[in-house]
Structures are given as structure tokens and as C-alpha cells.
Image (spheres, rainbow, N blue to C red):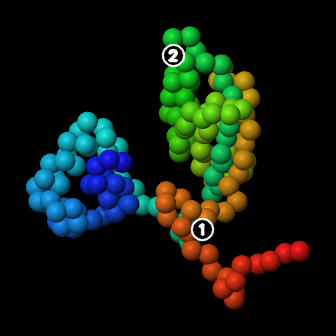
Amino acid sequence: MKDPLLKLLSTKARYSSEDLAEALSLSPEEVDSKIAAWEKEGTILGYHAVVDAEKAGELGVSAFIEVKVTPERGGGFDRMAMRIARFDQVDSCYLISGGYDLLVVVDGKGLREVARFVSEKLSTIDGVLSTATHFSLKAYKEKGFVFEQESDNGRLLVSP
């Protein structure tokens, strides 16, 4: 990000206008004005906390689903991606390079719920040619935040 205020906000969204202004040698009014303009024009889409789901007691699962689609005439991949992105189960949806066209991140209460979403909703959409589902087993880093892992002796395991 070119603007240092946007860069700082992307990691420290809970900072007050005064904290942001002091860190960047701006006035709080300048910070508030820039943020309001970015929110209005859609540059800033929202704010959220990065949560360690395991520590929060969440027992759900996340899946990364590669999707191969037929691009639509006049809409390319965009219409198909937006259609998929609108499902409540979908956390994120990206156009990707490689063997598949879209990467869809889905959160569910369990494996069966994600499997049901794939088999009943995603794969039945006209133009979806194939899917490959990968379940997240453990998070180590997300949105730039490293999830601290505790070990018994502080050393990494070495296996033969």
C-alpha cells in the first residue's frame, strides 16, 4: 500500500485517530477525513479481528476449494466468482492462476457441512466443471499474524 495511513490501519485498526495521527505526523482531523473518504469510496471495506479459532473454542472447519469453471460470455470469470462469493458459507473467493480458476475459502461447522455445500450448491452451478477440496488442519499464520505455538521444551521436533 502506498499510503502509510492505509498500511498502518491494515495492521493496527484499533488505534485511535490520535494514535494514528501521532505515528504519521498528521492531525487527527486529517486522519478522520482520509478514513471517512476511503470508507465512502469503498477503499476500506471493513474492520475485523484476527482470531485464533482454537483458543476461542471454535470447533468448525475451514476448507480451501479449488474450482474450475467455464468463463461466461461477456462476463468472463467475474460473474461466476461473484455468484459463488454471495453464498453465506463463503469467507473469501479469489481468481487464481494454475490448474484451477477460483480459490474459495469456506467455513463450516464440520466436514459434512462443507461437503454438503460443495455437493449441493457449488458443484451444481452451471459452468462449474470440477472442484478440489482441501481442509485446513492447523493455522500458523493468518493476515500477517503468526499464531504462537507452545511446545513442551521450546524446541522443534526432529523426526528421522
The disc, 1 or 2, on the residue closer to the chain's N-terminal end is 1
- Residue ranking furthest to the front: 2
Q: Residue furthest top?
A: 73
Viewed as shown, does residue 29 lie left or right of 119? left
Q: Quadrant of residue 150?
A: bottom right
Whole-percent x, y for residue 111 in the image:
72, 50
Q: Is residue 63 above or below residue 148?
A: above
Look at the numbered disc 1 and give the secondary structure of its residue.
loop
Query: Which residue does the numbered mark 1 point to in the structure image?
Result: 54
Q: Quadrant of residue 31?
A: bottom left
Do the numbered discs 1 and 2 sit on residues whose CB atoms are within 8 Å? no
Identify residue type, mark 1.
Answer: Glu
Crowding at mark 1 (Cα within 10 Å: few <14, some 14-19, many 20+)? few
Q: Residue at x 53, y 45 (%)?
A: 91
Q: Is residue 123 visible?
A: no
State the residue position of label 2: 75
Amino acid of disc 2:
Gly
Q: Secondary structure at mark 2?
A: loop
Which is closer to the viewer, label 1 or label 2?
2
The image position of residue 61, as x and y in percent, is 65, 55
Tally of marks? 2
Task: Judge by depth and name the residue closer to the eye, 24 or 34.
Answer: 24
Image coordinates for residue 126, horizontal then vertical, percent: 65, 19
Picture quarter with the C terminus: bottom right
In the image, residue 80 sits, relative to residue 154, either above or below, namely above
Q: Tell me, yes or no, if residue 4 can be seen here.
A: yes
Q: Residue furthest right?
A: 160
Q: Residue at x 53, y 42 (%)?
A: 92
